[in-house]
Amino acid sequence: MKREKFGIVLPIVLLSYFMIVLDNSIIFTSTAKIGADLSLNTQALAWITNAYALTFGGFLLFSGKAGDIFGRKRFFMIGLVIFSISSLLVGLSPNGPMMIAMRAVQGIGSSILAPSTLALLMDNYNESMRTKAIAYYGATGGLGASFGLVIGGLISTYSSWRIAFLINVPIGIVMLVLSVKYLSASNKFSQKIDVLGTIFSVLGVSAFVYSIDGTVYRLPGLVIAIISLILFVLQERRSVSPIMPLTLFKDTERKYAYLTRFFFIAVGMAYFFLTPLAMQRVYNFTPLMAAIGFLPETVPQFIAATVVTRITDRVKTSTIIFVGTALMFVGALLAAVVRIQAGYWLAIAIPMVILGIGQGMALGTLTIAGVAHTTPEMSGSASGVVNAIHQIGGSVGLSVVVALTASYIQPTAAYNVQMIWITILSAVAVLFSLGIIKGEKQPKKETTEGQFRNKNLNLELDESIKQN
């Protein structure tokens, strides 16, 4: 059922998405306290993040497709149950191994929720309402990530890190009850799961994420990732029911939206992680002060994202993306030129405002462009691709910037050079956003999986006729 008003569906979907983004963000500021309470060394602490990242990134493409096949409402509710139960067990974990294992399960729950929430918005709203709903979805992601820092800082300072995970349980239960009552059952599509494609995608994406975020054996992980992803693409080309239909990449607007998103989130993740760290090392901020010090980015981002939801029916999506990425570039460039020695207000706060406005403008609209011109049977797959690129781009961006500045021991020098590289990545995002403008001008027709599938079925029919 397509809705003319947002109703209760939008809050259900956005709060569920907010929950997983917030939870992942809180980890950044709670890690030290978790390590102290559970007596974990640095390597074990890294796995609290890595275990989640591996399963979350690895299962995204499968989850997007599975929602198309089994029904998005049902699959969304399964994701809520998995995420809520695993959050409970993470919060009750008495030791490191149990926490790491449950974080991996939590990642699977998130990998179901992330594409399902986006696909549900596409199912429930039409045209301008859908565009606004997806823009709110993007705003929710940025808000959850930023407020996660503040909440994590408060928890680290005044309470137990376990609360951050246990709070997900009552929220998950409420969302589950509301989902049963208010979410409409989406159509199921008579397709089969591409088993080989699923295996290759899970192995390939997980190995690739590990080769970036892992602690040991990263090169073998990269080799496994490359081989698996090559096999995955070959499998998707011949599959009757691919989990990532390659026709998604034929549309110029979507293709450049994916590329822009990759570099956009690479910038966002690197800046999001390294700037609070620099505030603590250079300005001697506490974790809570660093989190509050990030508000000049958070508040403008949310305001800009909210304004975007009101103008998407009057201003082209590609224009908003270009202006947003350009502002992000200007903010990063200003921080790189001013340098952190100039003090918090000049070097951090003012560039943050500009950067935050740009990110607020671009994040939701990049999501809109990433799922544009897809039919209902493809929306889950498209949502999976958007979220997979988001996850991989963030991991690559942070790791590349850290690797390129690892030789700088002085925190001041390290952050100044890091901002130079972040500025370069921002410039690449701006360049790719021009491709979205080009793609938006081209004649459009909806991408359907049926186009791809019917071609394969015709080939199979021809083979059958020849054999008979």
Image (cartoon, helix red, strand yellow):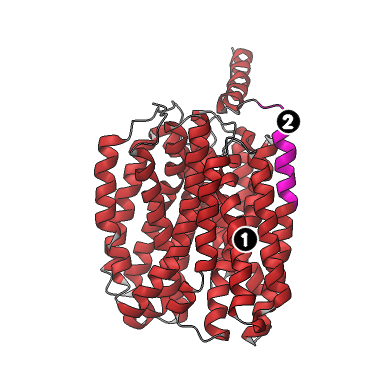
Which residue corresponds to mark 1?
266
Which structural element holds mark 2? loop
First to last magenta residue range: 431-444
Instruction: Provide the secondary structure element on which disc 1 rests.
Output: helix
Q: Main secondary structure of the magenta part?
A: helix
- Which residue type carries mark 1? Ala
In what quadrant of the picture does the N terminus appear? Answer: top left
Q: Is residue 434 magenta?
A: yes
Q: Earlier in the sequence, mark 1 or mark 2?
A: 1
The x, y position of residue 61, in whole percent, is 51, 45
Instruction: Kindly report which numbered mark, 1 or 2, lies closer to the viewer in this rendering.
Output: 2
| Percent x, y of residue 299 | 50, 61
Crowd around label 2: few <14 · some 14–19 · many ≥20 (10 Å): few
The residue lying at 37 percent from left, 55 percent from top is 19
Q: Which mark is residue 442?
A: 2
Residue at left offset 67%, top offset 74%: 418
Q: Position of residue 351 (x, y in %)?
A: 63, 68
Question: Badge 1: few (under 14), some or many (20 or more) residues near its Cα, within 10 Å?
Answer: many
Please report the residue visible at 42 percent of the width from the left and 29 percent of the height from the top: 4
Q: Report the quarter where the C terminus lies.
A: top right
The residue sitting at 66% across, 56% down in the picture is: 263
Disc 1 to disc 2, C-alpha distance: 28 Å
Label annotation for residue 366: none
- Residue 404 visible in the shown view: no
Q: Position of residue 177 (x, y in %)?
A: 24, 43
Compared with residue 274, is residue 441 higher up or lower down, i.e. above or below? Answer: above
Above or below for 306 versus 249: below
Residue 266 falls in image quadrant = bottom right
274, 319: nearer the viewer: 319
Residue type at mark 2 is Gln
